[in-house]
Image (tube, rainbow, N blue to C red):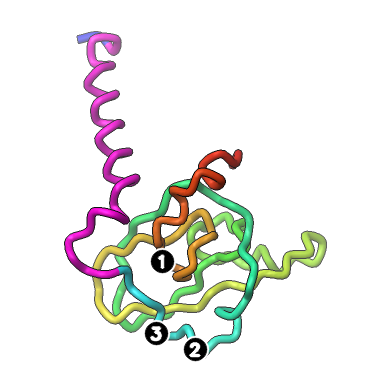
């Protein structure tokens, strides 16, 4: 079977995956968007501005309970959604620091990649706003 005959099948699969990513925030299984238990401990959580948009959709991954993570807020890490220390480069003059966080339950979480969420580091659906979707990444 040639690749051209299979193209509609790949298109359907791609559309299915995209639909799941774009609607996850509004159609949940009843569980609320998680919060960061370390939010009041680290001062980096009080940064008022957001980093550059890395991607217009969130990143889903399994996180382990009790483990500490560093979520990239500047949007320039090569290890997204986590910090790789790029913000420390003095020539880039980045003022954003990573958000330290942990989770209370081992499971899959949606982490924000647009860096505009108001519930750092978890996606709250902010990426769906028209002004974010119109920006070039």
User: Could you tell which of marks 3 and 1 lies nearer the N-terminus?
Assistant: 3
Task: State which quarter of the image contains the C terminus.
Answer: top right
Disc 3 secondary structure class = loop
Which residues make up the magenta segment?
3-32
Q: How many discs appear?
A: 3
Q: Earlier in the sequence, mark 1 or mark 2?
A: 2
- Residue under label 1, please give it: 122
Rendering coords of residue 59 (x, y %): 39, 54
From the image, give the main secondary structure of the stretch colored magenta: helix
Locate residue 116 relative to residue 109 in the image: left or right: right
Per the image, label 2 sits on a secondary structure element best described as: loop
Q: Which residue is mark 2?
A: 40
* Relative side of 95 to 134, left or right: right
At horizontal 47% and vertical 83% (from top left) the residue drawn is 39
Counting other residues with Cα less than 10 Å from the Cα at mark 1, is it few (<14), some (14-19), or many (20 or more)?
A: many
Label drawn at residue 37: 3
Q: Are marks 3 and 1 in contact (CB under 8 Å)?
A: no
Residue lying farthest front?
130
Instruction: Give how far apart the Cα atoms at labels 2 and 3 are.
Output: 8 Å
User: Which residue, as the protein is rendered here, is positioned at the far bottom?
Assistant: 41
Picture quarter containing residue 136?
Answer: top right
Q: Quadrant of the N terminus?
A: top left
Q: Position of residue 127 (x, y in %)?
A: 46, 51
On screen, residue 72 versus residue 93, left or right, reads: left
């Amino acid at each position: 079977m040639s690749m051209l005959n299979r193209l509609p099948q790949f298109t359907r699969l791609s559309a299915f995956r995209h639909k799941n990513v774009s609607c996850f925030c509004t159609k949940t299984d009843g569980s609320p968007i998680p919060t960061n238990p370390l939010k009041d401990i680290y001062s980096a959580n009080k940064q008022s501005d957001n980093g550059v948009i890395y991607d217009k959709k969130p990143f889903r991954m399994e996180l382990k309970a009790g483990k500490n993570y560093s979520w990239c807020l500047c949007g320039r890490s090569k290890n997204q959604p986590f910090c790789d220390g790029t913000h420390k480069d003095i020539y880039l003059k980045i003022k954003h620091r990573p958000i330290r966080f942990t989770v209370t339950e081992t499971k899959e979480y949606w982490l924000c990649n647009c860096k505009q969420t108001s519930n750092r580091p978890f996606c709250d659906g902010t990426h769906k706003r028209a002004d974010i979707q119109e920006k070039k990444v």
